[in-house]
Image (cartoon, rainbow, N blue to C red):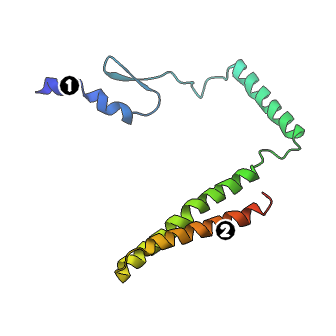
């Protein structure tokens, strides 16, 4: 009985192991890591310095503004959320009215009302600049 479960131990444990563990002969081993007390490799120091210099050059070239958020993408995400949330929210309100008032079909009317409101909101936001 014990032999049938012997091979399954690392199959269940593997997803729970942290980064840096590998399985070898059924036992977990740590992968080699850089010792924090050891002196830094000259190649890594050179690479870090070149990266800092390239970032400084890019900041100077773009005026130091750094990363600029795309305003058109923000407006698109807002439109997407309106197109999803207005109809679903109004249909949910209509469903609640149907349940409490013992009626049927109010949720469909509210769904169309929410869709119409979403279209109106999209039209209003399309008239504005993406600022």
Side (left or right) of 80 relative to 104: right
Q: Residues within 10 Å of mark 2 (few under 14, many from 20)?
A: few
The circle drawn on residue 6 is 1
- Residue projecting furthest to the left: 1
Side (left or right) of 98 relative to 83: left
Of residues 129 and 94, the one nearer the viewer is 94
Label 2 or label 1, whichever lies nearer to me, is 2
Find residue 56 and report its horizontal and vertical position in percent: 84, 36
Q: Residue at x 83, y 47 (%)?
A: 65
Of residues 64 and 128, the one nearer the viewer is 128
Of residues 3 and 88, the one nearer the viewer is 88
Find residue 104 and report its horizontal and vertical position in percent: 38, 75
Q: Is residue 125 above or below residue 31?
A: below
Find residue 115 and report its horizontal and vertical position in percent: 57, 66
Task: Identify the secondary structure beneath mark 2.
Answer: helix
The circle drawn on residue 120 is 2
Q: Residue at x 49, y 73 (%)?
A: 109
Which part of the image, by quadrant, shows the C terminus? bottom right
Picture mark count: 2
Q: Quadrant of residue 22?
A: top left
Q: Is residue 34 above or below residue 80?
A: above
Q: Is residue 83 above or below residue 25?
A: below
Side (left or right) of 44 relative to 84: right
Task: Identify the secondary structure beneath mark 1.
Answer: helix
């Amino acid at each position: 009985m014990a032999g049938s479960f012997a091979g399954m131990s690392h199959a269940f444990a593997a997803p729970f192991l942290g980064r840096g563990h590998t399985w070898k002969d059924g036992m977990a081993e740590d992968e080699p890591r850089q010792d924090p007390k050891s002196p830094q490799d000259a190649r890594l120091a050179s690479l870090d310095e070149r990266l800092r210099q390239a970032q400084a050059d890019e900041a100077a070239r773009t005026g130091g503004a750094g990363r600029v958020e795309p305003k058109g993408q923000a407006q698109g995400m807002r439109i997407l959320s309106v197109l999803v949330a207005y109809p679903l929210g109004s249909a949910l309100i209509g469903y609640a009215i149907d349940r409490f008032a013992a009626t049927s079909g109010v949720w469909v009317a509210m769904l169309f009302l929410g869709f119409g409101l979403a279209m109106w909101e999209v039209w209003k936001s399309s008239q504005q600049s993406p600022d």
